[in-house]
Image (cartoon, grey):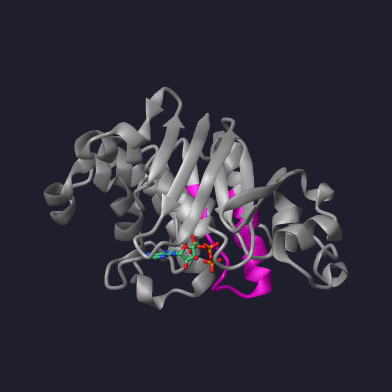
Amino acid sequence: MLQLKKLVKTYRTGDQALKMIDLEVPDGQVLALIGPSGAGKSTMIRCINRLVEPSSGEVWLDETELTRLGAGALRRARRKMGMIFQEYALVERLTVMENVLSGRLGYVGFWRSLARRYPQKDVDEAFRLLDRVGLLHMADKRADELSGGQRQRIGICRALIQDPKLLLVDEPTASLDPKTSRQIMRLICELCAERGLAAIINIHDVALAQMFVSRVVGLRFGEIVFDGGPTELSPDKLTEIYGEEDWEATIETVEDETEEAAPVAAVAP
Ligand SMILES: Nc1ncnc2c1ncn2[C@@H]1O[C@H](COP(=O)(O)OP(=O)(O)OP(=O)(O)O)[C@@H](O)[C@H]1O
């Protein structure tokens, strides 16, 4: 279980990005975080793994208060939190396999990883994950040879090879076309279900969030103004989150495309 207790972030500029956020995310729950630009979504995601240092309040992952940890303990705790980024954050000149294996850096140490001496079980798991996301045949390609959707699949594998409990996902589809966006969201949600992972997905596309997650949290000016199921997101609620706009068009259901899903192969949890 992830718990945020009275979490506050005020940047040095004086921007109050998060104001007393209280939130509980049970094990295995996938939650979409929505809200207008500047609402504090990225800040919240980054305060959880302390890429951004909270100003006050507490973050708990199970029995561990992350906000109290020193550098060494934080490094170990971060293994339990996989992160997926909008811009993929791959190392372009490395191969797909090397990028996936870099997710094990927190376990094998920097020098061993530099010498590419990953344990065989890590390499085996990397192959299994690549197979699961449909990119086994790309293992030896350089990252800069891939499309955006393929890159994000590698980013997902890199996060999963950490063996996390929780995924922190920051605008995973913002650089992708609509069809690829749906494929990537579906893949993330399927993998979370298969592995019993919780996830917080910062996402701009409300319709996409509604298609795939069971809980939506709406942020506005650093405060939670909505917390409920996707079907509860009425135009009124959306106006509360985003301000005035014509929401009828936006929340129109996108047709599902099951046949586009990545091939479902068995991956041992
Ligand atoms: N490094 C920073 N220094 C100062 N202020 C910041 C910094 N990062 C974010 N902010 C401010 O904090 C507030 C929340 O920003 P944040 O990026 O978390 O919002 P967001 O909801 O993720 O927005 P977007 O959807 O545009 O990415 C904004 O007012 C922003 O200007």
> Based on the displayed image, in which of its 4 quarters is residue 191 positioned?
top right
Instruction: Measuring from the top left, give residue 56's x and y in whole percent.
Output: 40, 41
For the point 19% across and 51% down, which residue is it? 113
> Based on the displayed image, in which of its 4 quarters is residue 122 positioned?
top left
Residue 183 is inside the magenta segment: yes
Q: Residue furthest top?
A: 63
For the point 20% across and 37% down, which residue is it? 72
Is residue 103 or residue 9 the one in the foreground? 9
- Residue 97 lies, with reference to residue 265, above or below; the image says below
Instruction: Measuring from the top left, give residue 177's x and y in whole percent.
Output: 63, 75
Residue 265 visible in the displayed image: no
Instruction: Measuring from the top left, give residue 64's x and y in whole percent.
Output: 38, 26
State left or right for residue 115 relative to residue 142.
Answer: left
> Based on the displayed image, in which of its 4 quarters is residue 227 positioned?
top right
State left or right for residue 63 relative to residue 201.
Answer: left
For the point 62% across and 43% down, which residue is it? 30
Is residue 132 or residue 253 the one in the foreground? 253
Residue 120 is inside the magenta segment: no
- Residue 144 lies, with reference to residue 111, above or below; the image says below
State left or right for residue 112 relative to residue 269.
Answer: left
Q: Residue furthest front?
A: 14
Residue 54 visible in the displayed image: yes
For the point 29% across and 45% down, which residue is it? 104
- Residue 176 lies, with reference to residue 79, above or below; the image says below
Is residue 264 or residue 58 the one in the foreground? 58
Task: Write down the region rendered in magenta.
Answer: 168-188
Instruction: Measuring from the top left, give residue 236's x and y in whole percent.
Output: 84, 58
Q: Residue furthest right?
A: 248
